[in-house]
Image (spheres, coloured by chain):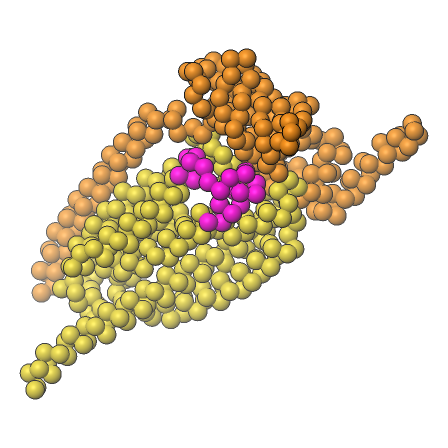
Amino acid sequence: MSGDIFLTALPNSAAGSFLHRFANPGRFLRLSRWLLPLLTVVALVALAVGIVWGLWFAPADWQQGDSVRIMYIHVPMAILASSGYLALAVCGVLSLVWRHPLADLAAVEIGPVGAVVTAMCLATGSLWGKPMWGTWWVWDARLTSVLVLFFLYLGHIALIHAFDEPQRGYRAAAVLAIAGAVDLPIIKYSVNWWNTLHQPDSISLTSAPTMSTSMLAPLFICMIGFSAGFGALVVARVDAAILEGRARQLMTRRLPDQERAA
Amino acid sequence: MITTTRTGGRRGMTRKTRRLWLVLACVGCLGVATALVLNAFSSNIVFFMAPSQLRDHPPAGDRTVRLGGMVVAGSLARTTEGTTPVNAFEVTDGQAAIPVRFAGILPDLFREGQSVVALGTMQKDGIFRASEVLAKHDETYMPKEVAEALRKSGKWDPRFGKPPSAAEWDTMTRTEARKITAQGSGAPASNGSNGS
């Protein structure tokens, strides 16, 4: 039954109808037909504006100078690394509790994108740390917890492909994604709970950002651009996975028929 | 057909609810366990010790520790021994100040009023001998012109710590900042020329 999700619609249960509306791969393909171009256009336009604004027109920082421009890449990557893992954990809950088949596919496809984003966050942070702090890497709470997040992503990718029977891989990876989510509040609050070399957040929901608006505006546009790009990559990958699954099922269905005919 | 789907659906519902509670309970237990572990190890997770902590709990023997705090304004003395630069400065957290000696090149961001983290050992003479000094910048990002305007208008001296609340300056444009700097620098500059 579960193997048939690529070809058949799922029965609608009363409570899960909202969730199951999106569990239907056909419906997802129809959704992505306009969502994917939209996300792609938003990503390209926002990144073109945000990166040029940030790297050339935004002011240099009074003490960090031009090195501060790494922020326009580093901060969106850091935010996407955490939110990507949050998405994995949500997929894990949908998979374990509601047996949502599309959530499993999404988890397979979010993992590698999230891992790359986390690697970019670590790499840009390291490049920023050397000229400013005087070191590529320290084992403070913020840096270490993000490194743990990177390994959680790698573990998730490995685990979800580790079983011959995909369902068991999905189940195990979902458990890892949910358990690993305890790292997210640690990353977020590490700079407040313990003293770290990494400075506390400049942008928060509760107080005014401790950043000049002339830097905040391009940063915000870069965040929108990178987030839309992340979304576009994931949607395109899920699309491809659904089509691949369909093609494979049509082939395996046709094979016995051909054998019988022959 | 419809009735069987319905009852099946309802039984499925309770199974889903049970699974949901199970997942929530596991996440809750894991969260509590992590919180307890982190709380127990909190003194090992901190990256550095403040000068007052180091004064109250001096490390045993010549154990290597990290000392973090603000460089006291006016305390920096740079000399050279042979070809290596030797830097002496004091690090404070507002409650205690500890003299630090560091032979080597300081990071670019190092200045009086900047937060630094020094790795080293506490000597018997009360001087912290550092083998590595890292600069720790704060979460404030402002253009040079705005920093200059705040300094000229007397709202902030970077040698004495954090800038004023962001609401005072975050919407200040560079043009406005240059205007304030031009006005502010007018008076002291003319005074200076009169004096000389």
Name the residue rendered at 54%, 64% in the picture: A45
Chain identifier of the orange chain: B
Quarter of the image with the N terminus of chain A in it: bottom left
Q: Is residue A140 magenta?
A: yes
Chain A, chosen colour in render? yellow
Vertical comparison of B145 with A35: above or below: above
**Image check: B39 left or right of B76?**
left
Name the residue rendered at 66%, 39% in the picture: B169
Quarter of the image with the C terminus of chain A in it: bottom left
Q: Can you give x and y, in whole percent of width and height, for residue B131 in the image?
A: 52, 28
Vertical comparison of B102 with B26: above or below: above
**Image check: A178 left or right of B58?**
left
Q: Can you give x and y, in whole percent of width and height, for residue B55 in the image?
A: 50, 14
Please state which of residues B12 and A104 is positioned toward the viewer in this rendering.
A104
Vertical comparison of A262 with A134: above or below: below
**In the image, which residues are magenta?**
A123-144
Q: Main secondary structure of the magenta part?
A: helix
Name the residue rendered at 64%, 27% in the picture: B81
* Residue A244 appears in the picture as rendered: yes
Where is residue A261, by image quadrant? bottom left
Vertical comparison of B185 with B40: above or below: below
**Image check: B59 left or right of B17?**
right
Q: Can you give x and y, in whole percent of width and height, for residue B45 in the image?
A: 39, 29
Please state which of residues B116 and B18 is positioned toward the viewer in this rendering.
B116
Q: Is residue A32 magenta?
A: no
* Residue B70 appears in the picture as rendered: no
Name the residue rendered at 30%, 29% in the picture: B37
